[in-house]
Image (cartoon, grey):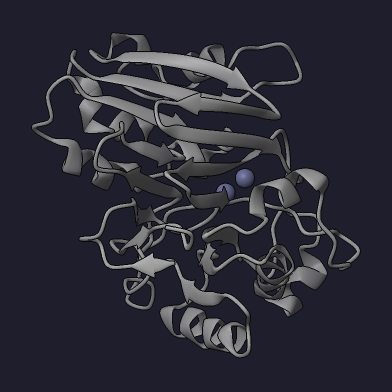
């Protein structure tokens, strides 16, 4: 159930909703041009942030003035559009901040920490990551089920390009699933992996990759993403109650996002909306 932000439950906020690269133009400002970043806040638990795209700068501003801040990041994968915001996340300048990053273990044996230290340092970035004041802790995960305080977290590898996780976060019976980058079957069939199914079944809010139209998918079927229509199918077949279309293509205009979303929403069993930067929704369980 999607309710206004004053009620208890999880407040889910969209800080970056684009895929692939940040963008800005007169016809993208309504939905926004920052890359993947969605935060979850509750009345009594640590904030959780899905991905560290450029949208995380705006989440960081909301954290200003919070002392001894502990933040949990559930990172789907290491592509630039999901990690570019990390060195611009202002709470990292505060020694009282602890950022715990849960990220997919890599098949080549290198640790996620090594990979970040390798990228965030001169000459690619002026300040080495290890010189930031905050404490950054890395946890490498795969197909796992674990708890963080009152949260239950489910992580599953999902089809994309390179090792990529999807997440399901549950708090007091309310659930949100984050499937930002999800390759629909390349042959155009509407099927889904067992892992993706475990993430999506009966979820209150599904945030799902909707990068391509059916026409675009014909030439981009191996690029690691989903169509609007596939996102709708995943929501309906999983009995998701809400579907947020996400990871908008950087070339998609506001007008086209609204137009295609309206088509997808027509007759869908889930309530459908296009994720928009700056919007927040409150997710509570239907069983409450
Ligand atoms: Zn992406
Ligand atoms: Zn990706």
Is residue 63 rendered to the left or right of residue 237? Answer: left
Is residue 105 rendered to the left or right of residue 83? Answer: right
Give the residue displayed 63% in from the left and 79% down from the top.
269
Q: Nearer the viewer, residue 169 or 214?
A: 169
> Is 269 drawn above or below residue 176 in the view shown?
below
Give the image quarter of residue 16: bottom left
Give the residue displayed 35% in from the left and 70% down from the top.
25
Q: Position of residue 201 (x, y in %)?
A: 68, 56
Give the residue displayed 31% in from the left and 31% down from the top.
46
Give the image quarter of residue 137: top left
> Is 284 drawn above or below residue 72 in the view shown?
below
Is residue 234 rendered to the left or right of residue 9? Answer: right
- Quadrant of the rendering where the C terminus is positioned: bottom left
Res. 144 in view: yes
> Is 136 drawn above or below residue 153 in the view shown?
above
The residue positioned farthest toward the front in the image shown: 288
Is residue 75 rendered to the left or right of residue 73? Answer: right
Q: Nearer the viewer, residue 6 or 222?
A: 6
Q: Position of residue 171 (x, y in %)?
A: 43, 42
- Quadrant of the rendering where the N terminus is positioned: bottom left
Give the residue displayed 63% in from the left and 82% down from the top.
268
Q: Position of residue 267 (x, y in %)?
A: 63, 89
Q: Nearer the viewer, residue 93 or 72?
A: 72
The residue positioned farthest toward the left in the image shown: 65
Res. 128 in view: no
Q: How many marks?
A: 0
Q: Position of residue 23 (x, y in %)?
A: 41, 60
Give the image quarter of residue 241: bottom right
């Amino acid at each position: 159930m999607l309710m206004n932000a004053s009620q208890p439950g999880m407040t889910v906020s969209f800080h970056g909703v684009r895929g692939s690269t940040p963008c800005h133009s007169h016809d993208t400002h309504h939905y926004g041009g920052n890359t993947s970043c969605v935060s979850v806040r509750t009345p009594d638990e640590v904030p959780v942030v899905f991905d560290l795209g450029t949208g995380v700068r705006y989440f960081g501003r909301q954290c200003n003035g919070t002392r001894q801040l502990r933040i949990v990041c559930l990172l789907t994968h290491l592509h630039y559009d999901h990690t570019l915001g990390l060195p611009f996340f202002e709470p990292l300048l505060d020694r009282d901040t602890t950022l715990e990053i849960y990220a997919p273990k890599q098949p080549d044996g290198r640790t996620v920490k090594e990979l970040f230290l390798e990228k965030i340092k001169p000459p690619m970035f002026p300040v080495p990551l290890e010189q930031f004041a905050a404490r950054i802790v890395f946890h490498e995960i795969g197909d796992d089920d674990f708890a963080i305080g009152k949260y239950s977290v489910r992580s599953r590898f999902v089809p994309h390009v390179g090792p990529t996780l999807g997440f399901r976060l549950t708090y007091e019976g309310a659930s949100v699933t984050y499937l930002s980058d999800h390759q629909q079957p390349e042959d155009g069939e509407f099927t889904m992996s067992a892992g993706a199914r475990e993430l999506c079944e009966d979820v209150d809010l599904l945030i799902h990759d909707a990068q391509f139209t059916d026409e675009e998918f014909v030439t981009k079927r191996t690029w690691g993403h989903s169509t609007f229509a596939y996102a709708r199918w995943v929501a309906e077949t999983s009995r998701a109650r809400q579907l947020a279309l996400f990871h908008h293509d950087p070339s998609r205009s506001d007008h086209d996002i609204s137009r295609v979303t309206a088509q997808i929403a027509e007759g869908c069993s889930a309530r459908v909306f296009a994720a928009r930067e700056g919007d927040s929704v409150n997710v509570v369980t239907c069983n409450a």
